[in-house]
Image (spheres, grey):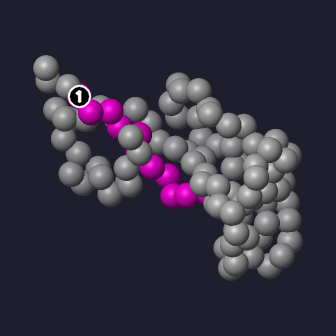
Amino acid sequence: MGVPITFLEKYNPEQFEILGITLGNTVDYPMTVIYENAVQHNKDGSTQGGSKVNTRAAVLIKEEPIGTVYYTADNADGYLLSIYPRILIRWISRE
């Protein structure tokens, strides 16, 4: 499960195992999507290569965002927003 970084203030190692963070290649899990030919669209209207969208969590939305950086990719049917890093945790079963 992904939780905000503020979760660390309440983290109990007897309840949860930290697996990594959704930023870069910090954990060994398969990526579910690799965005092809990604483009970053900046607030000022300029564009640049957007490969970094493949190194962080992203959400797909249908409407073009206004006033924020977003991404497009050949294999994404909509617009991608990079979200704040999330801590990936796993609940530890005591059964």
Residue 70 magenta-highlighted: no
- Badge 1 is on which residue? 92
Q: In which quarter of the image is residue 63?
A: bottom right
Q: Where is residue 5 in the image (x, y as percent from the top left)?
A: 38, 54
How many residues crowd around disc 1 within 10 Å: few (fewer than 14), some, or many (20 or more)? few
- Mark 1 lies on a secondary structure that is loop
Q: In x, y percent, where is residue 92? A: 23, 28
Residue 50 seen in this snapshot: no
Q: Residue furthest top?
A: 95
Question: Which residue reaches farthest left?
Answer: 95
Determine the residue positioned at 16% across, 32% down.
14
Give whichever of 93, 42 is nearer the camera.
93
Q: What residue type is labelled 1?
A: Ile
> In which quadrant will I find the N terminus?
top left
Q: Is residue 92 above or below residue 57?
A: above
Figure quadrant of residue 62:
bottom right
Say whether residue 89 is visible: yes
Give the percent coordinates (x, y) of residue 94: 14, 23
Q: Is residue 19 above or below residue 3?
A: above
Taking the spot 40% from the left edge, 32% from the top edge, the residue there is 19
Residue at 79 percent of width and 66 percent of height:
41
Image quadrant containing the C terminus: top left
User: Residue 44 occupies which quadrant of the picture?
Assistant: bottom right
Q: Is residue 31 left or right of residue 17?
A: right
Could you say where residue 23 lies in the image, as x and y percent from the top left? 55, 45
Indicate left or right for 28 with 2 as reference.
right
Q: Where 84 sits versus 45, above or below?
A: above
Asked whether residue 84 is drawn in magenta, I would say: yes
Say which of 65 and 24 sits in front.
65
Residue 62 lies, with reference to residue 27, above or below; the image says below
Q: Give the range drawn in magenta.
A: 82-92
